[in-house]
Structure formats: structure tokens, C-alpha cells
Amino acid sequence: MTLSADRDGGAVIFDALPDQPVLISTDVTISENALGAGFSFGGANLAQALAVSLDMKYGLLRYDATTVARTRYAIESSRISRKIDPEKRIYHLNVLIDNDVAVFFLDNREALSTRIYRMPGMPWGVFVCDGEACFDHLTMRLLKED
């Protein structure tokens, strides 16, 4: 799935997350001109959904408890972040979600964990800010049956 965006951003929003643990996996390729790309949780549009982003401007995988629409105005300091190599432009992400806990595994070497209280039973999606991002092999699978 390839997303293109201007300054207003571009996204695909999916149905609500299931009420059981899931694993979301994807390979993300971010264009040279993109400010960033990532996942959205807890809202049906970019003004409501919270962002976990690969911030290319500051070289961070970050969660700031801000909406996707506000990610383009992010400052360098971050609430929760891990350094990334912004020159690389291709990243593998696994996201383990259990209720309101999310753990983001970047390239099988870095992890960022947080609580996002607006996740359970809410829509989720992927987004890009200014430019293009390709989410290859985007899958979500249930980790345990009811």
C-alpha cells in the first residue's frame, strides 16, 4: 500500500482493533521528501488519531501523545523515542498490542513501549506526512483465540 501526501497528510484508517492481543507487521519505505510516516490509533481521522511515527526530520521513532495532524509541528524533544537512521529510509516494524499497551519493534533491534488509552476498540491506521510511504506486507494477526 503506497500513500502520498501533501502538507495535510495522507492516511488509510482501518476498523477498530480487536479486543485481544494482535501483532501488526510491515516494511515501511519512506521517500526522500517525506517528513515521516507511521501508525495512528484511537481516531477515525487525522485530527483525532494519535501518532507513533518514524520522524525523518529528527531521526526518531517517537510517541508524543499528539494527533497525526500535529506531527508536522513536532519539536526535537520527545516524550518517548528511539533514534533511527534517517538516511536508511526502509524500516521493518512489528507492533505488539494488548489492550492499551503497545510495543514497537524496529528492525528487530530497538523497542519502544507505551500505553495509548485510546487504542482498545478504536480505529487504527497508517499515515505519511509530506511525500510518500509504502507499507509492504502490512498484516495484523490475532495472538490468541477467545
Image (tube, helix red, strand yellow):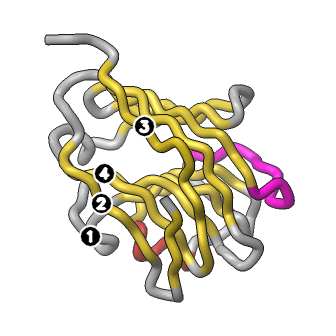
Question: For this rendering, which residue is in front, 58 or 127?
Answer: 127
Q: Which mark is residue 124?
A: 4
Q: What is the magenta range?
A: 80-89
Closer to the chain start, of discs 1 and 2, is 2
Closer to the chain start, of discs 4 and 2, is 2
Closer to the chain start, of discs 2 and 3, is 2
The 10 Å Cα crowd at callout 2, few under 14, some 14 to 19, many 20 or more, is some
Label 1 sits on what residue type? Asn
Q: Which quadrant of the view contains residue 77?
A: bottom right
Q: Residue furthest right?
A: 87
Which residue is disc 3 drawn over?
139
User: Can you give x and y, in whole percent of width and height, for residue 115 in the image?
Assistant: 38, 37
Check if mark 4's residue and mark 2's residue have beta carbons within 8 Å: yes
Check if mark 1's residue and mark 2's residue have beta carbons within 8 Å: yes
Instruction: Give SS at disc 3.
Output: strand
Which residue is disc 2 drawn over?
13
Measure the alpha-carbon separation of dots 1 and 2. Answer: 7 Å
Label 3 sits on what residue type? Thr
Residue beneath the point at 27% across and 53% down: 14
Which residue is disc 1 drawn over?
45
The 10 Å Cα crowd at callout 1, few under 14, some 14 to 19, many 20 or more, is some
Instruction: Give SS at disc 4.
Output: strand
